[in-house]
């Protein structure tokens, strides 16, 4: 779920800010990124299950969910809103739909 939400939010941010070489190029980039994001999101769950999950399953779930939320936020703000790309449609490369209470 982390990979799906991250890829969808990154794609929406790129589309809203006019980042990239077009829909086909952005789609191919996201297609390549999706399995890498999935692996990066799955590894902590495996580690948590094999270490903390054997004794404290509730703590493992809470830690895993917190890590998934932080990873999603990091990926969307790092990949979806690149500071080095001049986006004329979005001020400071932050899409208009991004919540103001979340730092970008």
Image (tube, rainbow, N blue to C red):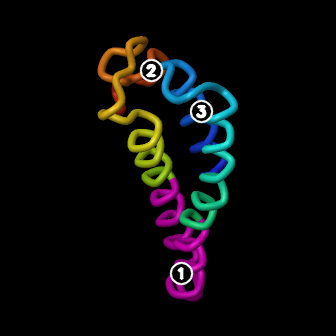
Label 2 to label 3, Cα distance in Å?
11 Å
The part of the chain drawn in magenta is: 42-68
Q: Which residue is mark 1?
A: 47
Give the residue at x 30% y 34%. Answer: 84
| Label 1 crowd bin: few (<14), some (14–19), many (20+), radius 10 Å | few
Q: Is residue 37 visible?
A: yes
Label 1 to label 3, Cα distance in Å?
29 Å
Q: Which mark is residue 11?
A: 3
Give the residue at x 46% y 47%. Answer: 75
Q: Is residue 38 magenta?
A: no
Q: Can you say whether 28 is above or below 98 in the image?
A: below
Quadrant assignment for the C terminus: top left
**Quadrant position of residue 22:** top right
Choose the circle earlier in sequence order: 1 or 3.
3
As helix, strand or loop, the secondary structure at mark 1 comes to: helix
Q: Which residue is mark 2?
A: 95
Between 5 and 50, the residue placed more toward the observer is 5
Q: Which mark is residue 4?
A: none
| Label 2 crowd bin: few (<14), some (14–19), many (20+), radius 10 Å | many
As helix, strand or loop, the secondary structure at mark 2 comes to: loop
Q: How many marks?
A: 3
Give the residue at x 46% y 60%. Answer: 67
**Residue 57: x %, y % from top left:** 58, 76
Magenta highlight: main SS: helix
Q: Is residue 43 magenta?
A: yes
Between 22 and 75, the residue placed more toward the observer is 22
**Residue 60: x %, y % from top left:** 53, 73
Q: Can you say whether 14 is above or below 37 in the image?
A: above
């Amino acid at each position: 779920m982390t990979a799906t939400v991250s890829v969808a939010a990154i794609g929406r941010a790129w589309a809203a800010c006019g980042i990239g070489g077009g829909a086909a190029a952005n789609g191919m980039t996201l297609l390549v990124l999706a399995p890498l994001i999935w692996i990066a999101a799955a590894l902590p769950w495996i580690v948590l299950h094999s270490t903390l999950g054997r004794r404290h399953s509730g703590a493992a779930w809470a830690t895993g969910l917190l890590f998934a939320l932080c990873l999603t936020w990091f990926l969307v703000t790092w990949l979806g809103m690149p500071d080095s790309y001049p986006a004329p449609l979005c001020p400071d490369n932050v899409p208009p739909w991004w919540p103001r209470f979340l730092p970008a």
